[in-house]
Image: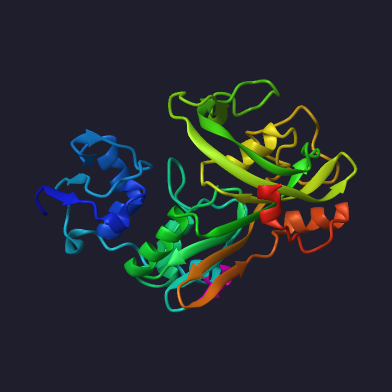
Amino acid sequence: MSGVQQMTVEAADAGSRLDRWFKRQFPHIPHGKVEKLLRTGQLRVDGKRAKGSARIEGGQVIRIPPLPEPSEIKTAAPIHKDDIAFMRGLVIYEDDALIALNKPFGIAVQGGTKTTRHIDGLLPALGEGCRLVHRLDRDTSGVLLIAKNVRAAKWAGRAFQSRRAEKIYWGITNGVPKPSGGEIKGYMAKGRLDNRFGNKHEGKEVMEAVRHGAPGAKHARTLYQCAAKAGQRAAWVVMQPLTGRTHQLRLHLQLLGAPIAGDPKYMTDRPLPGGLENKLHLHARRLTLPREGKADVVIEARLPGHMQRAFEMMGFEGTGEVDWDEIENG
């Protein structure tokens, strides 16, 4: 067991989430243990309690409580061969530093209350030292990036933090956004779900639009364009988030009057268009990572089954390519 440590954040790590920074420094500490250290105030920033989502800054001092040595951590049970096959079957890109998965609908990226099977826990199936670079919601499918080592995690993490990584999402909406393309921006913060639409998740935490200066308010920007419409019932919407807030796209589409079809939290009083499965129709379609002196890494993920069937039923066709400069400057 180590003693208390005081670690100064390097400039290169500025902007990192506290929990991800900690995992890079101490990869042998389980995620659940990190959450407990934060919850109990043992892991502190400049002497103050902090949440795992807090963004750290260069020069800040992180208090590290006594931690077990790697040799003292109980070895996890071997990954079952079926889970190895499952994870390898999700791989859509791999090089010497990165792996990309096409994450299915319905599986969590990280563990939590009552969540024991998740991508993070299955990463040993892809190799020793693999770690998450970013996250997707449980019911969002598509490109999920994994780093093979600490160095790759730092490089890719900085690309996300600096917004140099371009993320493109496809969604099918319940109704048609108005206007059909442009930019939506504003402030958002955590709130609680009400019962306007008879939602069974009443009281659960959601994001909501707030005014600048409201407690916890963070600015969010999304570019979007309808690629096709099925009358006024539904639309295929292509989205590029310019910020990375929790549930950003889901809230923004609801604010445009056409929430993502099948979304259990960000809803409308319109019924789900006939024939669509009651699942979230949101997919991380493409990720582009710039590399100095090399070609960009461009990774695309095929649609999940329920969205592919929806595309066929609605007659949506095309590449979904959008001139984002025109949208942003128009």
Q: Is any atom of residue 207 visible in this view?
A: yes
Residue 207 appears left or right of 321: left
Q: Is residue 173 above or below residue 312?
A: above
The residue positioned farthest toward the right in the image shown: 231
Query: Which quadrant of the figure has residue 26?
Result: bottom left
**Which residue corresponds to the image point at 20% horizontal and 45% vertical from the top-left?**
62
Q: Is residue 271 above or below residue 325?
A: above
Q: Nearer the viewer, residue 1 or 3?
A: 3
Coloring scheme of the render?
rainbow
Residue 182 appears left or right of 20: right
Counting from the top left corner in percent of width and height, residue 112 is at 43, 44
Q: Is residue 275 above or below residue 121?
A: above
Q: Nearer the viewer, residue 162 or 140?
A: 162
Q: Nearer the viewer, residue 151 or 290?
A: 290
**Which residue corresponds to the image point at 32% horizontal and 47% vertical from the top-left?**
18
Counting from the top left corner in percent of width and height, residue 287 is at 58, 63
Q: Quadrant of the N terminus?
A: bottom left
Task: Confirm whether the magenta stretch covers residue 92.
Answer: yes
Q: Is any atom of residue 132 visible in this view?
A: no
The residue positioned farthest toward the left in the image shown: 3
Q: Nearer the viewer, residue 302 or 181?
A: 181
**Which residue corresponds to the image point at 66% horizontal and 49% vertical from the top-left?**
328
Counting from the top left corner in percent of width and height, residue 77 is at 35, 63
Task: Confirm whether the magenta stretch covers residue 24.
Answer: no
Over which residues does the magenta segment extend? 88-94
Residue 251 appears left or right of 172: left
**Which residue corresponds to the image point at 53% horizontal and 32% vertical from the top-left?**
188
Counting from the top left corner in percent of width and height, residue 222 is at 62, 44
